Image (cartoon, rainbow, N blue to C red):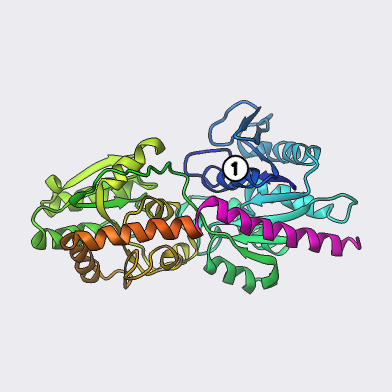
């Protein structure tokens, strides 16, 4: 049994890394007999400090302040360090190499040779720096420079690195991280799953999105072309845009194409209501531009679709082909090819038996490979290797 501390840069914000990646992994590790604690600053929610438990996992929010904003960083990092070391973990898993988790990992690495120091692992689920996630965030120059340095330093100064995609593995190797120190650790789903999902509406498509991964005009073009082939086709859009301007561009294109009556906008939906809305669709469209951000991404939403058994017609970019097996759990199309996506979607709308078989295959594959109980075993292997490297480095 291991004592594992998971340190995050932020609290449990919806769809954030600690909520959809660290916590489900912690729960699965707890079921395998380990003791796990999540330690975070509640930066986005501004909650007071507290400690609580969820299904055997201990969670702690450290205090913010005393100054306003990021000026409190030294105090917050000190509290994260104190709470982490006081728990006396065998392993510390820092989720994201940037911000508070990255600074905490930096301090832990300085004391790595101290007797009893924990093994340190860093987790990366998005490329954060140049050409990556920073392109979607309006970080000031100083903060952007810090995050770039933290990402490169954090990946190369740890006893082990867990990475959510093959592209991230390749980037880590390019920085000099030995392949033996990297572990591919993709995302699973956190949605509840029922054994008796509602029957899907025959001609309803799903777009489950934050509008960040593709040109918002493209799904409108797909729907417009499908409407000429399948008169009853409709599109259900679930999710809220990260950038309101992209959502506005989508809405304007829908109106301009005369498709308003065919589009159902659901916006943000509570997790417990998502399965009903998602499984009520015959298939999902997954437009995904070929970019560095998308190649590095391992989408939780795609894992949700697989777990719920929804066949997907997707652009073949990055990790998408891990979840969508061409001809088995859905169809892969060339990135940006509207005609190909239209043809494959029409095929599934016309052949409901095929769509049903693909959905069952997707659900079965998810249970076999991407359930968090399976992913926890991958994390265990990463922890074992990191502990051995720590012991070797310290001369133990």
**Tag 1 secondary structure:** helix
In-image side of 387 versus 290 (left or right): right
Magenta stretch contains residue 378:
yes
Residue 244: quadrant of the picture: top left
Q: Residue at x 36, y 63 (%)?
A: 288
In-image side of 8 versus 319 (left or right): right
Nearest the viewer among 153 and 386 is: 386
Q: Is residue 122 visible?
A: yes
Image x and y of residue 249, in percent: 26, 51
Residue range of the region highlighted in magenta in the rendering: 370-396
Q: Residue at x 75, y 41 (%)?
A: 84
Image x and y of residue 134, in percent: 51, 56
- Picture mark count: 1
Q: Residue at x 87, y 49 (%)?
A: 116
Image x and y of residue 75, in percent: 73, 36
Q: Residue at x 38, y 68 (%)?
A: 325
Dominant secondary structure, magenta:
helix
Image quadrant containing the C terminus: bottom right
Nearest the viewer among 385 and 68 is: 385
Q: Is residue 158 visible?
A: no
Magenta stretch contains residue 321:
no
Image x and y of residue 251, in percent: 22, 48
Residue at image mark 1 = 27
How many other residues sit within 10 Å of disc 1, few (<14), some (14-19) or many (≥20)?
many
């Amino acid at each position: 049994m291991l004592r594992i501390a998971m340190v995050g840069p932020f609290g449990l914000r919806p769809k954030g890394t600690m909520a959809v990646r660290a916590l489900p992994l912690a729960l699965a590790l707890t079921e395998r007999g380990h003791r796990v604690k999540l330690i975070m600053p509640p930066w986005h929610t501004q909650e007071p400090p507290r400690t609580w438990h969820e299904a055997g996992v201990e969670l702690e929010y450290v205090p913010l302040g005393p100054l306003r904003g990021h000026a409190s960083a030294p105090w917050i990092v000190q509290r994260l360090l104190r709470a982490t070391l006081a728990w006396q973990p065998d392993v510390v898993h820092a989720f994201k190499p940037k911000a508070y988790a990255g600074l905490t990992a930096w301090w832990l690495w300085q004391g790595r040779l101290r007797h009893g120091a924990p093994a340190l692992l860093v987790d990366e689920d998005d490329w954060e720096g140049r050409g990556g996630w920073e392109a979607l965030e309006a970080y000031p120059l100083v903060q952007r420079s810090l995050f770039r340095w933290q990402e490169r330093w954090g990946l190369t100064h740890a006893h082990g690195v867990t990475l959510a995609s093959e592209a991230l593995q390749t980037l880590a190797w390019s920085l000099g991280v030995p392949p033996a120190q990297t572990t591919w650790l993709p995302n699973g789903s956190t949605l509840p799953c029922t054994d008796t999902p509602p029957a899907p509406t025959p001609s309803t498509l799903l777009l489950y999105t934050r509008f960040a991964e593709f040109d918002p005009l493209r799904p409108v073009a797909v729907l417009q072309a499908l409407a000429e082939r399948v008169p009853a086709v409709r599109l259900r859009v679930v999710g809220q845009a990260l950038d309101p301007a992209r959502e506005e561009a989508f809405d304007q294109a829908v109106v301009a194409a005369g498709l308003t009556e065919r589009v159902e906008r659901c916006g943000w939906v509570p997790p417990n209501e998502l399965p009903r809305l998602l499984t009520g669709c015959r298939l999902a469209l997954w437009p995904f531009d070929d970019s560095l951000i998308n190649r590095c991404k391992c989408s939780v939403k795609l894992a949700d679709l697989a777990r719920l058994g929804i066949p997907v017609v997707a652009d073949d970019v990055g990790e998408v082909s891990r979840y969508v097996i061409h001809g088995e759990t859905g169809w892969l199309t060339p990135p940006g090819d509207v005609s190909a996506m239209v043809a494959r979607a029409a095929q599934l709308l016309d052949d409901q038996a095929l769509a049903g078989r693909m959905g069952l295959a997707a659900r079965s594959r998810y249970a076999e490979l991407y359930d968090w109980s399976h992913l926890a075993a991958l994390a265990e292997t990463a922890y074992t290797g990191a502990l051995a490297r720590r012991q070797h480095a310290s001369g133990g």
